[in-house]
Image (tube, rainbow, N blue to C red):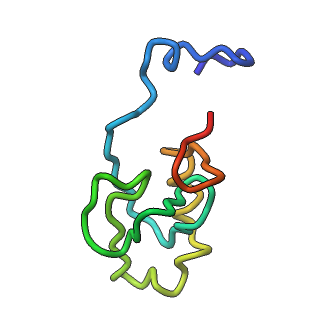
Amino acid sequence: QSAVVDHRPFFDKGLDGTGQIVAVADGGLDTDNCYFRDSRNNPFGGWDKSRRKIAYYDDSFADQLERDKGHGTYVSGIIVGRKSSNGVDNEV
């Protein structure tokens, strides 16, 4: 955000992406990765905006073969990454 260690002007103003939904078209997403894991919900059951990170995952385009190792994990992590060790809470 600023190229200065521990200086995050956007976060300091409350701009942290909360409540935003983005779409990613890429192959494979490791839903158990600490940046996406949600211990309360299965992301493969249709839209659910109450989920911690993945509101919807359409893996009908051959993603089933690379769910846990696809490039989509890398791309999505850049966009929405905030890890959780317990699958419920976000960690800074």
Quadrant of the frame with the N terminus: top right
Please say if 79 is above or below 51.
above
* Vertical order, 73 against 13 (above or below): below
Above or below, comparing residue 42 to residue 65 in the picture:
above
Q: Quadrant of the C terminus?
A: top right
16 and 90: which is toward the camera = 90
Q: In the displayed image of the protein, which residue is found farthest to the left? A: 47
Labels in figure, total: 0
> What is the quadrant of residue 26 in the picture?
bottom left
Residue at point 36%, 75% (across, down): 44
Q: Position of residue 73 (x, y in %)?
A: 56, 62
Residue 10, percent across and down? 49, 17
Residue plotted at (59% across, 57% down)? 74
Q: Is residue 45 left or right of residue 25?
A: left
Q: Nearer the viewer, residue 39 or 15?
A: 39
Q: Nearer the viewer, residue 32 or 85?
A: 85
Return the x and y of residue 13 as percentages of the image width and height. Answer: 45, 12
Up-down relation of residue 84 to residue 48 (above or below)? above
Residue 15 image position (x, y, % from top left): 42, 22
Residue lying furthest right: 5
Q: Is residue 84 left or right of residue 63?
A: right
Quarter residue 19 falls in: top left
Side of 26 relative to 49 (left or right): right
Residue depicted at 28% across the width and 53% down the height: 49
